[in-house]
Amino acid sequence: MDLLAAGFVYLVAAVIAVPLAKRLGLGSVLGYLIAGVVIGPVLGVVGGETVDIQHFAEFGVVMMLFLVGLELQPAMLWRMRAQLLGLGGMQVLGSAVLIAAAALVFGVAWQASLALGMILALSSTAIVLQTLGEKGLMPTAGGKGSFSVLLTQDIAVIPMLALMPLLAVNAVAGGHDGHGDSGHGAPAADAHGHGHGAPTLFDTLPDWAQAVAVLLIIGGIIVAGRTVIRPVFRFIAEARLREIFTAAALMLVIGIALLMNYVGLSPALGTFLAGVVLSDSEYRHELESDIEPFKGLLLGLFFITVGAGIDFQLLLSNPVGLVGLALGLMALKAGVLYVLGTGFGLRGADRWLFSLGLAQAGEFAFVLFGFAAGAGILGAEVIKPMTLVVALTMLLTPLLFILYEKVLAPRAVRTEDRAADEIDEAGSIVVAGIGRVGQIITRMLVTNGHKVTVLDHDPETIENLSRIGFRAYYGDATRPDLLHSAGLEDAKLFIAALDDREKQTELVHHVAKTYPQVTIHARAHDRHHVYELERAGAHLAQRETFEGALAMGRDAMTAIGYHPFRAEAASRTFRNHDREALDGLRESWNEGGVSKSYIDAMRAHSQTLFELMKADRHDTHDRSERGWTPPPKGDASL
């Protein structure tokens, strides 16, 4: 199949599989992998070109590291040094030693065992960062810890590439050929310490001179990022041609990747460094928006090639053994990560996210297997099944994220290491959830002299509120025993302000059913959630962003030239009409979805709003309201 036809097939598979996977809650990564399995091993539409396309698609990882670098300013990176060196370093070392020991038990030569340990200790940067970003888990403690380990692993590829030829030399000298042709030791020596076995610019230099040259290259990138690249981007931006700026962004990433290849360093590491240097530049956001689509497409292509490259014939020849190896590898790595996560202070759901998210082998394994084969350390009889094992671990990873999200994380929250606080004094008002909305409500009530009991499962927020005098208690606000301890039987008002939409509705339903005498006010995400909460038993449900958005809209009208009276009048008209529409649409709404009658009613209300606003523009100068001076007749404001 020619490249154009193959590209079309890959795109068709992605366009069909990924939206379906997202709709089923499986995530885009699993969608890409399934698409690859369908067009590769199942239908046989693609095949021979998969490896070549995979080498090209790996550039998506390089772009991703550049974007990650743009998000990390140097000061932030310095603050992460303990996690990078401690958590990341110990993970690579611990996993490599245990995997090598396991390989020795299976009778693999020590050189090959050590190589397998190093290769399989690495995790998949592409899958983990993509999934953490999609699920919004990157800012969590587990997400930050995962990122630290992935960054360390990327750096660790460099010493691994340097160690491989030494293992090959030892294999030859010790009479072990590492399951491969000992003659391959020669090319390994030629590629001493450099990526992918290709000759580099510094091959003829002595080792110390190579180290100095590499340091100079890295220093040159940092200096150029601050003194050359910014003025160049400024010059290009002044041309006001978006496509040229995009071309310049791609040129920068590709150029650094090529430079890294020429000097024998990891292209991903080089582009990450460039991203960090440019993280505080004025062109950071433009660079992100220009690179992001290319990164997404290439990563998707990479995942499809992983799925398409699974050798089902080999898998069917020994399904128990190969799947067992994949599960055993993931269990071993998850065990190491769980212990390290505990040692570095991760608890509950964060510890599970950290342990399961990084349990797979990574895309660098495909590169390092080729390097180890060229060096004569690993033979085809080891590489073929282990490549399949790596692909299987990547295929299983989205399922682990689903296990974390649906099963482990909710239980971890409920069984957090810290026990719920004992509530020693109940208040007449109980607030469940002390996020953005709950904090404002609580402060308003407390400063007006009311006794408010606050429940939340964020220990840091609870401790901070307690320090400044609030009656805040740690615990899961959806737990019936905690609600009872909070004195809900004697409370006058219950305010439900949880972030989680489904939990919020369930909480309102429980309180309305168990404590029917309590008045319930609830925070709603949108108009449909208002109806859901009302059906669950809330006496009042307010959309969390409605009033704030109205205020911003009024300020926007003033900023573009409206008289403040006109802007305020428009804001009030909009508010009154929207509340009427909220009541009017209630009968047409149903939980199963938006019906035709609901859409027709929405259109009618929108038309009415247009007419109201049009009429308001003509008569506001004829009326006055307390505190507001209307514009004079003939006012020409917008």
Image: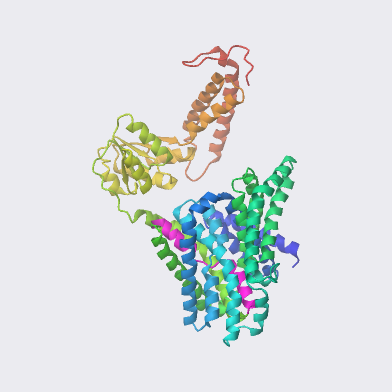
Q: Nearer the viewer, residue 342 or 509?
A: 342
The span picked out in magenta is 348-375
Image location of residue 425, percent across then percent down: 24, 40
Image location of residue 105, percent across then percent down: 47, 82
Q: Say how the picture is coloured.
A: rainbow
Residue at coordinates 50% horizontally, 61% vertically from top-left? 149
Image location of residue 160, percent across then percent down: 57, 70
| Figure label count | 0
Q: Is residue 16 above or below residue 329?
A: above
Residue at coordinates 46% horizontally, 66% vertically from top-left? 90
Q: Is residue 580 above or below residue 366?
A: above
Q: Is residue 140 left or right of residue 56?
A: left
Q: Residue furthest bottom?
A: 175
Q: Is residue 506 left or right of residue 576?
A: left
> Is residue 38 in sight in this rendering?
no
Q: Main secondary structure of the magenta part?
A: helix
Q: Is residue 246 left or right of residue 517?
A: right
Would you say residue 374 sits in the magenta stretch? yes
Q: Nearer the viewer, residue 549 or 489?
A: 549
Q: Nearer the viewer, residue 269 or 347?
A: 269
Q: Nearer the viewer, residue 446 or 236?
A: 236
Image location of residue 132, percent across then percent down: 52, 55
Q: Quadrant of the C terminus?
A: top right
Q: Quadrant of the N terminus?
A: bottom right
Name the quadrant containing residue 468: top left
Q: Is residue 16 above or below residue 383?
A: above
> Is residue 242 in sight in this rendering?
yes
Q: Is residue 497 above or below residue 322?
A: above
Would you say residue 530 sits in the magenta stretch? no
